[in-house]
Amino acid sequence: MSPTERFLRPGGQLRFFEHVRADSPAMRRVQRVLDATVWPRLAGGCRTGRDTQTALTGAGFTITSLEKFAFPQTRLPSPAATHILGTAERPRSGGTP
């Protein structure tokens, strides 16, 4: 049983705010290198290049709102700048989330 199955009832809403995989292939390469080397140690185990949207839908959630943006907005590119903010729902019946 996953953590969301224990704490989120069917039809429940998951709210998320995550830094995620970059849009550009060049920045995704930077994210892969950083995630394989120093980033997890610098940032308490987090990863810059996760594809949270795909992970949520793959776990059975239905994304009900999603906004993608750079945060903070700066002129210099950052491997952790691409963020998503949104909500997803756990299916109401049958199957696993």
Image (spheres, grey):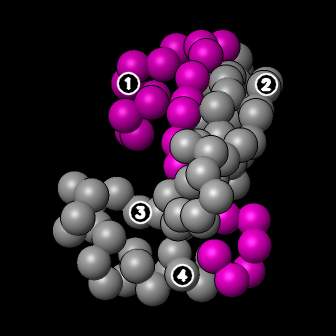
Residue 20 seen anywhere in this rendered image of the structure: no
At 52% from the left edge and 14% from the top edge, which residue is drawn?
Answer: 9
The part of the chain drawn in magenta is 1-27
Q: What residue type is labelled 2?
A: Thr
Residue visible at 69% across and 83% down?
26
Q: What residue type is labelled 4?
A: Val
Disc sitting over residue 47 in the figure: 3
Q: How far apart are marks 2 and 3 (CA)?
A: 24 Å
Which of label 3 and label 1 is nearer to you? 3
- Is 66 magenta? The answer is no
The N terminus sits in image quarter:
top left
Say if mark 2 contacts mark 1, CB within 8 Å.
no
Q: Which kind of residue does numbered mark 1 sit on?
A: Arg
- The residue mark sitting in front, 2 or 1, is 2
Q: Name the residue under label 2.
A: 64
Discs 2/3, front: 3
Q: Sequence-wise, which precedes: disc 4 or disc 2?
A: 4
Q: In which quarter of the image is residue 87?
A: top right
Cβ–Cβ below 8 Å for labels 4 and 2? no
**Residue 55 percent across, percent down from the top left:** 61, 52
Q: Are marks 3 and 1 in contact (CB under 8 Å)?
A: no
Inter-mark Cα distance, 4 to 3: 12 Å
Please tell me the numbered disc located at residue 6.
1
Q: Check residue 30 in the rendering and tell me which mark sits there, or answer none.
A: 4
Rounded to the nearest whole Å, what is the CA distance between mark 2 and mark 1? Answer: 21 Å
Q: What element carries label 2?
A: strand
Residue 22 pos. (x, y %): 66, 64
